[in-house]
């Protein structure tokens, strides 16, 4: 029997945007299961808006309709998290050429650490190519309307956190 296609989709997801959601749902076309893995960045506390636990809760709400998508958090190396789950595919979204260099370096480092794993890069729907969690954070924090860029569970938490 063919090996199950166990996908990990890692990131900071602070917060999850419609672009992230689009990528995760696209993964279901070829994956048996998708784990959205929220990374702890112990050194980057100052810029964060939501705790890792809050992010996990929001993402679970956004994918409540999709039993093949699971949400988890991880500390340490992505490759160790993937090895522990027997995940053989890591997916990252690529929006523009500017994403490429960082992603390519990470892919090759991850391969050096864990050759069994493949990195797959996916393009989001064209309408989301400008979207990033950091821009959503900035616009929301400055009072802009981000309702077109995030799902209702994320919007609700943004409103609770920032007000408005
Ligand atoms: O959404 P982001 O912040 O671009 O995601 C980056 C992430 C979480 C995928 C990356 O920082 C990561 O894999 N962190 C875990 C630690 C690790 O494995 N570092 C080595 C990467 S080669």
Image: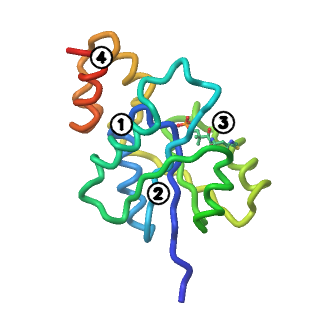
Indicate whether 161 appears above or below 79.
Answer: above
Tag 2 or tag 4, which sits nearer the N-term? Answer: 2
- Residue that sits furthest to the bottom in the current view: 1
Q: Are marks 1 and 4 in contact (CB under 8 Å)?
A: no
Q: Which residue matches tag 1?
A: 17
The residue depicted at 32 percent of the width and 37 percent of the height is 127
Question: Would residue 32 appear left or right of 156 to someone viewing this image?
Answer: right
Task: Check disc 3: other Cα within 10 Å, few if <14, some if 14-19, many if 20+.
Answer: few
Q: Which residue matches tag 4?
A: 162
Asked whether 102 or 17 is in front, the reply is: 17
Q: Nearer the viewer, mark 1 or mark 3?
A: 1
Tag 4 or tag 3, which sits nearer the N-term? Answer: 3
Q: Nearer the viewer, mark 1 or mark 4?
A: 4
The residue depicted at 60 percent of the width and 68 percent of the height is 86
Tag 1 or tag 2, which sits nearer the N-term? Answer: 1
Q: Secondary structure at mark 4?
A: helix
Q: Secondary structure at mark 2?
A: strand
Quadrant of res 119: bottom right
Q: Which residue matches tag 2?
A: 35
Residue 102 numbered tag? 3
Ligand 1, image quadrant it occupies: top right
Task: Check disc 4: other Cα within 10 Å, few if <14, some if 14-19, many if 20+.
Answer: few
Is the CB atom of the residue marked by disc 3 within 8 angstroms of ligand 1's nearest atom?
yes
């Amino acid at each position: 029997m063919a090996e199950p296609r166990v996908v990990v989709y890692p990131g900071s997801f602070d917060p999850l945007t419609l672009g992230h959601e689009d990528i995760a749902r696209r993964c279901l076309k070829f994956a048996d299961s998708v784990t959205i893995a929220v990374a702890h960045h112990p050194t980057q506390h100052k810029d964060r808006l939501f705790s890792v636990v809050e992010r996990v809760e929001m993402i679970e709400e956004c994918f409540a309709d999709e039993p093949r998508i699971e949400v988890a958090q991880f500390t340490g190396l992505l490759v160790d998290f993937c090895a522990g789950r027997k995940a053989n595919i890591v997916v990252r979204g690529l929006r523009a050429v500017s994403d490429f260099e960082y992603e390519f370096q990470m892919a090759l480092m991850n391969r050096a650490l864990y050759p069994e794993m493949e990195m797959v890069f996916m393009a989001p729907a064209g309408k989301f190519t400008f979207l990033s969690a950091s821009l959503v954070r900035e616009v929301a924090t400055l009072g802009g309307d981000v309702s077109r860029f995030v799902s209702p569970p994320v919007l609700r938490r943004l409103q609770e956190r920032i007000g408005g």
